[in-house]
Amino acid sequence: MRALLVLAACALAASLGSASLAAGDTTADAARLKGRLEPDAAAHVLAIVDEARSAGLPTAPLVARALEGASQQARSAVIVAEVRALAASLGGARDALGTGSRETELVAGASAIQAGVPVDSLARLRASRPGESLTISLVVLCDLVARGVPQGTATGAILSAVRAGGTDRDLLRMREHVHAQIQHGQAPAGAAQKGLRELLERRPGAREQAGGSARRTP
Amino acid sequence: MSLGRETLACCGLFALLAAGAARAESASGESAAPAWLRAPSARGPLSSVLAYDSRWAYGSLAAGVPLGARLRSGGVSSRDALPGFSVNAVLSASGQPGRVDSSPSWLRGALLLDRSGARSGGWLGLSSGEGRTGTSEVTLRLGLGAWRALTPIQIEGSVVTSVVAFRGDPRWSRTIVQHVPVGDDSSGQVFRDSSYTVSGDHMSRWLSGQGAARWQRGRIELEASGGVTAGEGATRRRWAQAAFQLQLSRRALLLASFGTRPAASLAFDPAGRPRSMIGVQLAPWSSPRWAMASAIRPSMRAWVTRRAPAGRLAIFLRCQDAKRVELASDFTDWLPTTLEPAGGGWWELIVPVEPGLHRVRARLDGGAWEVPPGLPRSPDEAEAPAGVLLVE
């Protein structure tokens, strides 16, 4: 009985602490948004952020997206809509990639969803590489779409590369090949297919090839 | 020697040209005036040329000062407003090391009144002479010119009147005969004719007419010019020159020419080339409007990040021809943050950054926001894509 009481007290303290932390986060977010957004828009954004926090989603990207919109002098309605869409995409990414996914995976996954990548493609990507980070795969996928590769082609190329055991370094190298091909005038879809072919031909020796220009921070 | 008629004629013609330029002007847009005419305001106060021709290596310095803000027709002063009148002073010096005083044209000064529209304009100039050559000395030049832009060709025509003083020239020597009394005889005083020659001093006018056509594309300009000079005491001289310019950077211009240009043609253009030559013109304080510098766009070349102590990130961005580099990201709350020059074209920013996936944009000289080089793009912004930076 005593043990039960202690446990309950701990749970209460933890929940109070958590609520206190959440309140602190909300205050900090409000301070960042103050002066950058109109009061109504800021209130809407904070409500979305609180909702996302309650759902266990990362909230920093939501506040950042609101500030980004403010810096581009977007209308308040557009900013709120963008933040709401990003929150929904983050939720979709978590559903597809799993609750244990890293924050960077969720952010990259949300970006992929906003680029038109189907949620089930993210789930297949996760299934192809269980337990490993999908951040780079998703970043490369988004980059290919941003450079004009049709979403279906880009998704197929990344899935094929991951299923073939392509590492993050391989994917980044493929991205650079595709970029170079596009710059030389090749159609983006053809460039992506050629990039994938090169990656598959290099496998399995690609792991040993060093010197890729991964844009990571050491 | 009077310059009255020439001066009146030049002023009259200039007024006509200025009126023509005023009709052709556009309310906005940059003037397409010849680079040499825009030099004092666009190239900066000082430029130098290091060159080699078939005779020697030589150098020259040109200093130009825009004396008056551009005055619009309504009399409202505005530096940015085009077109309008402007007054420029130009001083140039040139010579070969150790032989500066041997060149007759080593120091020159000119005053230019320029009326430039968007596509046409005219100028009136007064230039000091360039010293004595043989028995002749040019003391003053009065020039008048007009230009017209027919993109991508530009044509220019000008007339220069030179006041020339001949000193001790035998062509104008005079024989003076005097009756000198040598004594008396029975018939009276005796005279003898005595004659002597006075070497002649004489003032004259030379007239030079010239035309030029220029073609410009990107960083390259080709020019063909030619003219004729005639006047009392001078043999008629025709000349032609082809010139090439390549804008190497905002501050450096590669020059090459084939053929000659007489001093009258160079009186108002200190960067002009008297002979076949190859050289480099450097203008350390030039603006992007100088010569073909506007063809040079600042660009980002490389991006490197490195973890710094205390949770900070050192960001290095290598840029070419940039004077200001700014970065905006979620880790700056999307507020533009200026990078500091770090030498060798690199710009640096050290800023606290949490691990995670970040969106980044950069811009040069206040231009459009761009994805830093080498970073993957985020696809959700069609108009201003962002770069994606993974910080671990």
Image: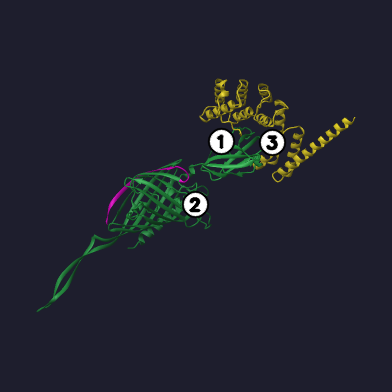
For residue A59, which quarter of the picture? top right
Task: Please determine whether, in this image, residue B17 is positioned above or below residue B4.
Answer: above
Within-10-Å neighbours for mark 3: few <14, some 14–19, many 20+:
many
Residue sitting nearer the eye, A43 or B208: A43
Q: CA distance from mark 1 to mark 2?
A: 39 Å
Callouts 2 and 3 in the same chain: no
Callouts 1 and 3 in the same chain: no
Q: Amino acid at mark 2?
A: Pro
According to the picture, the residue beneath numbered tag 2 turns out to be B83
- Find out whether the residues at labels 2 and 3 contact each other: C-beta distance under 8 Å: no
For residue B381, which quarter of the picture? top right
Residue sticking out furthest to the left: B186
Residue sitting nearer the eye, B122 or B298: B298
Q: Secondary structure at mark 1?
A: loop
| Quadrant in which the C terminus of chain B appears | top right
- A157 on left or right of B320: right
Residue sticking out furthest to the front: A2
Within-10-Å neighbours for mark 2: few <14, some 14–19, many 20+:
many
Q: Main secondary structure of the magenta part?
A: strand
- A10 on left or right of B343: right
Residue sticking out furthest to the right: A1
Within-10-Å neighbours for mark 1: few <14, some 14–19, many 20+:
some
User: What color was chain B assigned in the picture?
Assistant: green
Residue A109 lies, in percent from the top left, at 67, 29
Residue B22 shows up from this direction = no
According to the picture, the residue beneath numbered tag 1 turns out to be B373
Residue, x 30% and y 48% (percent of image)? B238
Q: Secondary structure at mark 2?
A: loop
Q: Secondary structure at mark 3?
A: helix
According to the picture, the residue beneath numbered tag 3 turns out to be A61
Q: Amino acid at mark 1?
A: Pro
Host chain of mark 3: A
